Amino acid sequence: MKLEILVVGLNHSTAPVEIREKITFPGDQDGRVTRLIADVPVVEEAMILSTCNRSEVIVMTEHPENAAEDVIEAVGRIHDLDPKTFSDFLYVRQGIDAVNHVFRVASSLDSMVVGEPQILGQVKEGYRRAADANATGPILNRLMHRAFFTAKRVRTETGVGLSAVSVAYVAVELARKILGDLKDKTVLLIGAGEMAELAARHLRTHAEKPIIVVNRTYENACTLAGQLRGRAVPIEQLDDGLVGADVVITSTGSCESLIKAPQLKDVMRRRRFRPIFLIDIAIPRDVQPESNEIDGVYLYNIDDLQTVVHENVGERRQEAIRGESIVEEEAQKFVEWTRTLESAPTIIALKKKLEGIREAELARLNGKLSTLSPAEREIVEIITRSIINKIAHDPIAFLKKAGSRSKRNVYLDVAQRLFGLDGLASPAGPEKEETKQE
């Protein structure tokens, strides 16, 4: 039976931040959670993609009609949630729609900020974890390598990635939109990961006052502050940093809120309720949502970036359309490749049979060939191998390109009868054939 590709997930366009922050896989560094998905009985191969704006499970299955429900239940168990609480926000893609989706995600055409380059690294990281956990197989391996190739084509053949954009960039743009000039503002950056570094890079061109960096690991805060010519503050002094800040951009990997509403209320008293603007681009969120109800607090989360995103998307829209054409072309090629897998056992059996005939005939003529020199024997080997390769070429090419599934099954049956392959075409052949095609 043929394996089907299935994608189950949610993202910024299907689920609000309140739901997205409940379905995340940030701690799966050792691939343990990926193995939980791969161990679902109907799943043959699996990987997880988890970013600030999406969580997706990509699986290979022989039973796509049952697998989606089983995967959703597994995600619910992992997060200790009733699937009914999040299933309405999920999308399910299957077959060529799933391939198209994976290629679009890797190419940053499905991102909140179209063209942002971080998503490709995140896809590669998800794939690496799955491979390290032995959760991938020949089809998922091929799918992801073609996704990386497609993403490279989209970036090199279109202008979709020309502008230096990212979620962090949009967060800084939102701060400028709210406060105007940032030169005389005190900026507090919470976190020292990739997103915080990107935000810092954009802030450096707009802020004149030293940027304050707070992070759980003080050494990392010092490193980032040094790059910014800013100042690092230990996490224990976060409240002091909040008291002096005009704008806060926070992006950590914390699983719980770093800034609680009662804590921020105390901070606001010390500030004499002077306004503070917090832009929280973390998932799960770093700032308790209730904080927005405190006088003088203006809290924005990652979903609030949409307005700024839409203002910046215009110039990339045409390039994105060109990228979509590349994705469709590559997705179709991949699907055609998966169809050849159904022919692989017959093709391998045919090659084995012809090679067996060649070896048997050489053995039968061994007495007459014994007088040949080693060089002459080598020439005979080359000629006989060339003959069987040429005999096999046309039928193999025909079987690989056979049309619809019903016709392909007829052709495979006829080929097995013509060449006497009954019982020789093992269904375990695709891996070997797939490796050769790589």
Image (cartoon, grey):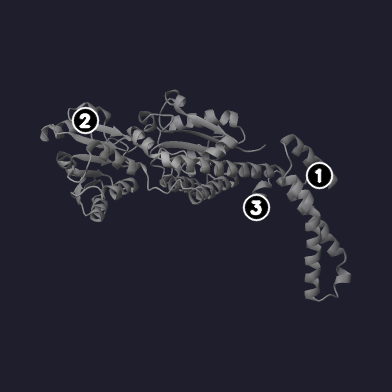
* Label placed on residue 363: none
* Label placed on residue 261: 2
In terms of secondary structure, where does tag 2 sit? helix
Q: Is mark 1 in CB contact (under 8 Å) with mark 3?
A: no
**Residue type pointed to by label 1:** Ala
Tag 3 residue: 437
Name the one closer to the observer, 32 or 271. Answer: 271
- Residue 79 at what x, y percent from top left? 41, 32
**Which of pointers 2 and 1 lies earlier in the amino acid sequence?**
2
Label 1: few (<14), some or many (≥20) within 10 Å?
some
In terms of secondary structure, where does tag 3 sit? helix
**Residue type pointed to by label 3:** Gln
Label 3: few (<14), some or many (≥20) within 10 Å?
few
* Position of residue 360 in the picture relative to residue 312 (left or right): right
**Which of pointers 1 and 3 lies earlier in the amino acid sequence?**
1
Give residue 331's quadrant in the image: top right
Q: CA distance from mark 3 to mark 2?
A: 58 Å
Tag 1 residue: 415
> Is residue 280 visible to the viewer in this orientation of the structure?
yes
Label 2: few (<14), some or many (≥20) within 10 Å?
some
Q: Quadrant of the N terminus?
A: top right
